[in-house]
Amino acid sequence: ITITYSPLSGSFFPVGNTTVTATAQDAAGNTATCTFIVTVIDNTAPVLTCPANLTITNDAGECGALVNFAATATDNCTASPVITYTDVTVLTACVSNYTINRTWKATDSYGNSSTCLQVITVQDITAPTASNPAAINVACYGSIPAANISVVTDEADNCDAAPVVTLLTDIPAAPTCNGGPITVSRVYKITDC
């Protein structure tokens, strides 16, 4: 008895079900056939390549930045695996500095998937601004008003709605009389979070 198969044993079988016909033939030429199914399952996940981790700074005058990047994936069965991502934002005490943990996922047409993590660090490097307060002229040293941060009236920042004004230097000790005018400079610092 001779048994033959179609397709032949050792053939390439694609993913899915393939019906194989087995035929038995005796010396007199009598034949009998039967069929069976060979099932090939794709359980190989796509190969996913994450973009590099990034540390980005804000665009000028903005509280954020436009950044372009993408993950890539290849697969043994699916020409273009579906690539998606989900973000988890990790906040800091300062709203303008934070981290995004971006999990990329590639899925092939058979439901196999792989993931990778990209960490994106966002930093605000734009300093807040303010104008110098108006000069104050007084006749006597004793008439110099106490320091008051409210003389800084136009503090602004690209990310922080309420930058903090602090006094860095104040009036020095009373000078000796030398008959000339005295100039006192106060330095205010504007800080975003």
Image (cartoon, grey):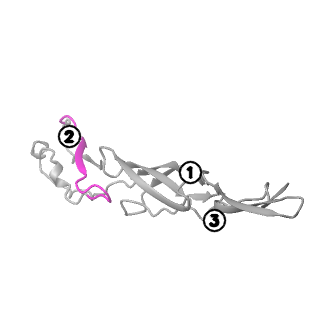
Q: Is residue 29 left or right of residue 99?
A: right
Amino acid at dot 2: Ile
Say which of marks 2 and 1 sits in front: 1
Image quadrant containing the N terminus:
bottom right
Badge 2 vs badge 1, beta-carbon distance below 8 Å? no
**Which residue does the numbered mark 2 point to in the structure image?**
171
Query: How crowded is the residue under tag 2: few (<14 C-alpha within 10 Å), some, or many (20+)?
Result: some
Residue positioned 28% across, 55% down in the render: 160
State left or right for residue 51 relative to residue 97: right
> Percent position (x, y) of residue 17?
63, 61
Residue at screen point 22% across, 54% down: 162
Residue bearing mark 1? 52
Q: Determine whether, in the image, residue 9 is placed left or right of residue 167.
A: right
Label 2, label 3: how many angstroms apart (C-alpha)? 73 Å
Residue 92 visible somewhere in the drawing:
yes
Q: Position of residue 15 (x, y in %)?
A: 64, 59
Q: Which residues are magenta?
A: 156-174
Element assignment for label 2: loop
Q: Pointer 1: residues within 10 angstroms few (<14), some, or many (20+)?
A: few
The answer, for residue 7, to whether it is visible in the render is: no
